[in-house]
Amino acid sequence: MKAEPTRAWQPLTFGGVACYGQDWVGRLFATCFIFSLIVAASVLWTARRTWAPVIDEAIARLPAGAEIRDGHLQAQLPMRLAENRFLSIQLEPRGDIAPRGSSDLQVTLSRSELQFSSLFGRSSIPYQPYWTLVLSRAEMDPWWNAWRPAVLGYLAGGTIVFLFASWIFLGFVNGLMVLVVAHMANRQVSLWSSWKVAVAALMPGALFLSFALVLYSLGSLNLPELIAAFALHFFVGWIFALLAVIWLPKPADNPFEPETSDEALEKNEEEPPNPFAPKSKK
């Protein structure tokens, strides 16, 4: 009787991850898409809760007459437009380097460049001479309201594309580990199956990272703790990939393989004597 094919339906247990190695790859991609939607939703939630309110307030407080023209910011006085613990936006037309604030990301419109400051250091984008940007509420508010849905859509779509690209790459890297461990544990697996198991094992880590993003947006985690959670979600994938090997099938016995002498002896001892066998002559 032919055994029914293995059906994978969830990657949140070690056995469930192992099932993806024996199932159709389309089911794996469908699972990845569902989990990518969860991660993208957490990214959008975090952006709308942490950054969007600061951007709205900063646009509402833009001073009249501020603009970027001929590669320079033209404004009367430096001012902090808006801030929270996640993001701060300020004008610094005098060209001074803004002091590091308490926000996780500090954006400064300085005299000749757009500065970004965070835990990772400083970076900047210089203004180009051909840029002409009027930084007034009357100009920026309609522009931001028109582009907000598109920006959020690009953010969600970019998150999904990035996740699929990273999962495919990490599947090859972690799949080699699964392949080696499976052979050491005497489990039947091919390179293709090990890749599917490795990709499925990344889903619990993605769910863990989504939960960490939500906690960060709620203020329960700070930025260093979020970075630690990001690093930890890779270990979650490794643990699920390694322990899923236990649930992989063992190699089937080869019926054409000759029996060893010990196996033949045990078989002869277990078989009863044949009463119809001819008696040997003495």
Image (cartoon, rainbow, N blue to C red):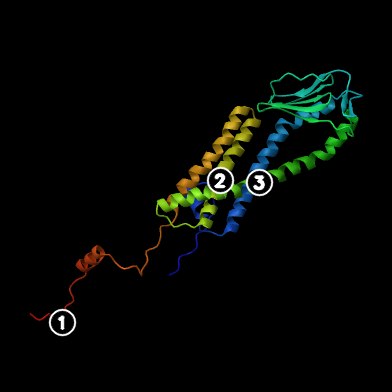
Could one spot residue 221 in this view of the protein? Answer: no
Which one is earlier in the sequence, the residue at label 2 or at label 1?
A: 2
Q: Amino acid at mark 1?
A: Pro
Q: Residue at x 64, y 44 (%)?
A: 38
Residue furthest right in the image: 65
Residue occupied by mark 3: 37
Residue occupied by mark 1: 278
Assess disc 2: are there few (<14), some (14-19) or many (≥20) residues with their C-alpha within 10 Å of its C-alpha.
Answer: many
Question: On the picture, is 99 further left or further right than 127?
Answer: left
Residue occupied by mark 2: 202
Q: Amino acid at mark 2?
A: Leu
Question: On the picture, is 58 further left or further right than 42?
Answer: right
Question: On the picture, is 267 further left or further right than 42?
Answer: left
- Expressed as whole percent of the image width and height from the top left, the position of residue 44 reads 70, 39
Which one is earlier in the sequence, the residue at label 3 or at label 2?
A: 3
- Expressed as whole percent of the image width and height from the top left, the position of residue 177 reads 49, 48
